[in-house]
Image (cartoon, rainbow, N blue to C red):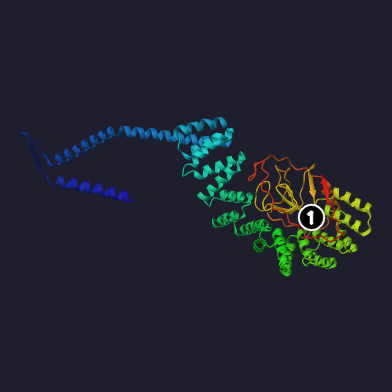
Amino acid sequence: MIRVIIYLALVTLIALAGAWIADRPGEVAITWQGWRIETSVVVAVLLLLLLVMILMLAWSLLRAIWRSPHLVGRFVDRHRAARGERAISQGLIAVGAGDLHAARKFAAEARRFKPQEPLALLLSAQTAQLAGDRAAAELAFRSMAARADTKLLGLRGLFIEAQRRADLPAARGYAEEAARTAPAVAWAGQAALEFRCAAGDWEGALAILERNMHNKLLDRSTYRRQRAVLLTAAALAAEEADRDRARALALEAVKLAPTLVPAAELAARLLLEKRHQRRAARIIERAWQANPHPDLAQVYAYLRVGDSPRDRLARVQALAAKAPGHVESAIAVARAAIDAQEFALARSALKPWLDHPTQRVAELMATLEQAESGNEGRAREWIARALRARRDPAWTADGFVSERWLPISPVSGKLDAMQWKVPLAALGTATVIEPERETIAAPSSAPAKPSAETPSGEAVPDKGERPPSSDQAEAKAEPKLEPKVEPVIPLMHAPDDPGPEPPPDREPAPAPAGDRWWRLRLFR
């Protein structure tokens, strides 16, 4: 609207100027070099305007001739850029569709027309990956890592390629460089954290965790849980060398995650060395209510040195009352009752679980028969039943079964992956079941097929667990074949890498004299 008004105003001014000149006629005379030109004012003005237009046209023509090389070059550049952009677009589509021939064609065209374009480098790398040419892919990613605008993309590609060829030191270097370059990048922060954990550098892992929290890469609850796991791992590593430091670390871990069984068990044991029985008992009771575990029951039974077996039985009964109806409560009471020679009480505690016993329940019944009447036949019968019994919960992560807790998965290197649950082992897998904790070695290769696991990251058994019904037991008795899973590249460990050595095992509390625990090597 404003432009229309301005246009009408200019037309009006020109018309007024023309009318003003027409109302004032006159003559213009020009004398030059003996020539005399006489004309009217109107004609003179029109001739002047025509001369100006001719000069402007001539100037434009000369300027176009002078700039013609630049204009031709710019036209060629625009044409090449358009072809390069079209090649990149079609090449990325071909890579996504898995068309290797078209991807190679458009990648070559993109390199010819736009060699320094970031997307052209990405197309070259993805085409090389599609063709299985790892060397070419790594070369393209190195070119991207050398540029400021594509450095993170290049480091990410180099990190993945290093993982694929099982070059863990190189993968760790790329991840930590990416974390230093851009601390807010989630994959780099998580990878650097897991590499520090795999190396047993708990102090460095704690520092990276703090940095990840500062950059808002994880929520508050996840941060507290992971910090508690790292503190527990650091306490286990320092347990033999510095008991005071281990105690402080374990207590801090319990404050962050009171239901973390390894932290509660370690903190209680170290507190008992300083005669802090009440504080240790509170820690065990709180963890037991959420996660009944045999390690907690063992520590709780020996809160006071020198107690009689009957005193330990009474204490364990009080602990079992905090998780009624749970199989771990029944096992803890039965074990303490056998120590105290209260065989009737032991049978009563295990009775709800005898129709379809777990392996530990069957082992305890064998121990009970041997201790009460010396009936070797009945004991062997229960041992035979243990061979076919349902498995007890164990520490599992990514299909790997461990007899003690580990801060990271020996398979994937994931932090806080261990869960206390019943492992679903494939047929033909040999597993050693030990009632007491003993040191195990990390696997030298990828384990058997991973079992089905719950998506929850925290191992919290069902507090309301009850003895299974006959129909459920028959359904569970049928072996379940796991689906075939294609091998995947582990995040932290190469296929031939044994992974981080687990922290040294701790000696269990002394068992009472005369106690006989059955140790079975079971083959499924």
In the rendered structure, the answer to whether residue 345 lies left or right of residue 62 reads right
Q: What element does badge 1 sit on?
A: loop
Q: Is residue 500 above or below residue 123?
A: below
In the rendered structure, the answer to whether residue 77 lies left or right of residue 63 reads right
Confirm whether residue 92 shows in the render.
no
Q: Residue at x 43, y 35 (%)?
A: 81
Which of these two is toward me, 21 or 368?
368
| Quadrant in the rendering for residue 297 | bottom right
Horizontal and vertical percent for residue 468? 83, 55
Which of these two is toward me, 501 or 183?
501
Horizontal and vertical percent for residue 317? 82, 66
In the rendered structure, the answer to whether residue 252 lies left or right of residue 176 reads right
Horizontal and vertical percent for residue 346? 87, 61
In the rendered structure, the answer to whether residue 446 lies left or right of residue 134 reads right
Number of numbered discs: 1
Q: Dividing the image into 4 quarters, which one contains the C terminus?
A: top right
| Quadrant in the rendering for residue 161 | top right
At label 1, which amino acid type do we have?
Answer: Glu
Residue that extends furthest to the front in the rendered view of this protein = 241
Label 1: how many Cα within 10 Å (few below 14, some 14–19, many 20+): some
Confirm whether residue 139 shows in the render.
yes
Horizontal and vertical percent for residue 347? 89, 60
Task: Give the residue number, with chain letter if any, for mark 1.
Answer: 436
Q: Residue at x 39, y 34 (%)?
A: 77
